[in-house]
Image (cartoon, helix red, strand yellow):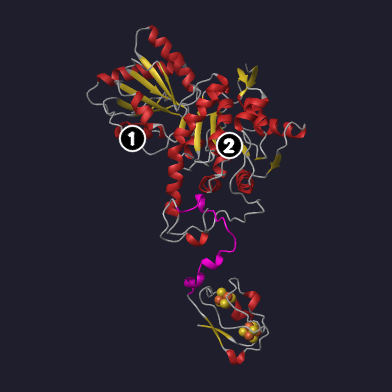
Amino acid sequence: MFESSKINAKSTWKEMTPGGTIYDAGNSVDFKTGDWRSQKPVFIRENCKQCLLCVPCCPDSAIPVNAEGQREDFNYDYCKGCGVCSKACPFHAIEMQ
Amino acid sequence: MGIRERLSGNEAVANAMRQIDPDVVAAFPITPSTEIPQYFSAFVNNGKVHTEFVPVESEHSAMSACIGASAAGARVMTATSANGLSLMWEMLYIASSLRLPIVMSCVNRAVSGPLNIHNDHSDSMGARDSGWIQLYGETNQEAYDNIIMAMRIAEHKDIHLPVMNCYDGFITSHSVENIELLEDEKVKAFVGEYHPEHYLLNKDEQIAIGPLDVQPFLFEHKFQQAEAMRKAKDVIKQVQKEFYELTGREYGLIEEYKMEDAEYAVVVLNSTAGTSKEAVDRLRAQGMKVGLIKPRVFRPFPGEEIANALKNVKAVAILDKADGLNGVGGPLFTDTTSAMLINKVTAPKAISYIYGIGGRDVRVEDIESVYKDLQEVANQENVTDTYRYLGLKGGRE
Ligand code: SF4
Ligand code: SF4
């Protein structure tokens, strides 16, 4: 049985699934999209009102929310720098650099 | 043993599809393949099959629907011709690279332009590098037998590639010939039930098909495809053997006709092989040692088998009903001659003949003239015109 998390850039053709089919779900966590980033959102904590408008806008779930329901700093492993969150924030708490 | 019938090629193929009873057929009509979905939709409406018939609005959609259904886990069939196949182009590559065992009849017709609806092989020859297995059939019987075998070849666990069942438009598709059909239950038993290991509608395994395949991966996936295509030769032979045990009809990767002592040979696909056999018989009656090779499979290419069959001839004409327009010769010619070279069969002189484009009639006398040309070629010191058009009006300068 193939496991997606075990298939990586060093895998041989025998270790890859036919046609590249992914046989197990929930594996986008294995794919770090952060290195696609050319611009980077910077979190300006003092401006943030914790309205959480930015969170559901992120296509890569790269804005973590903690147990208290507060957003944390960006997860740059997955943030691909699209800038959608900075447009969504009404309080200038996200600046693209 | 078997059911004696008289059917057109398309009717025979539609009947094979009825007997196979696939889960999904998605098709768009195009001459000369139209009758296949036409007959088949009647089977659907009359409750003869349990198939979901998807009447789509284009061939791109037809192949897309086939891909979706096949990925979902269904057994899928379709049919097309010429520009219909052209419109499927993008999806042909998706089907083969995702390893979906779709079976499609390609009723061979000239690809426009200028507009022509008659038979040549420019459609399937254009798709020769799309990763589909290609079977070619001379007669209605072969078109019927091939599509039944195609299902088994496509779905074989080591292969999982789509298969094209190619036969000549009008000549084979619309002519009525005597044919021996198998009983429905024998076809069902031969193709068996299709239970894919991985499929999208499996609620116990959530899979993703066709994900992004970047630099570290596509190279290896392409090799997997190449391996499947290479292995397909043995699988085709195995399926042909089982089919022979069931029907008594014996097939191979190539058919050799009177090649044992032949000095001059023709290599040709599909219905013109029948015309050529008559030419061989006539010339043999006059004492000429001539023979014929008919590849029954073009992808994977039976290069070793063809080269081996040619090793004792003085000259060979490779006839193509499509011009690849590479400035050198037709696609069957270029593949045959490179197979000869790598199998060290370099003694025979080889000539490319383009014939029958756009349905131009090719008679027994035309093929006889090819064999006579070969006799001259064998005696010539230096043959320079190795790329010829058979029966070209006005000849060549
Ligand atoms: S820039 Fe785009 S990817 Fe990064 S956190 Fe904002 S919305 Fe998400
Ligand atoms: S939208 Fe702006 S203010 Fe609201 S939580 Fe996000 S960063 Fe904070």
Q: Quadrant of ligand 2?
A: bottom right
| Residue that badge 1 annotates | B338
Taking the spot 43% from the left edge, 11% from the top edge, the residue there is: B281
Per the model, the C-alpha gap separating discs 1 and 2 is 28 Å
Q: Secondary structure at mark 2?
A: strand
Residue B200 point in image, percent of width and height: 63, 51
Q: Which residues are magenta?
A: A15-37
Q: Is residue B276 left or right of residue B16?
A: left
Above or below, comparing residue B227 to residue B145 in the picture: below
Q: Is residue B221 left or right of residue B15?
A: left
| Residue that badge 2 annotates | B104
Above or below, comparing residue B94 to residue A78 in the picture: above
Above or below, comparing residue A18 to residue B28 in the picture: below
Chain under disc 2:
B
Q: Do the residues at pointers 1 and 2 share their chain?
A: yes
Image quadrant where residue B62 sits: top right
Q: Amino acid at mark 2?
A: Met
Q: Quadrant of the C terminus of chain B?
A: top left
Residue B284 point in image, percent of width and height: 38, 10
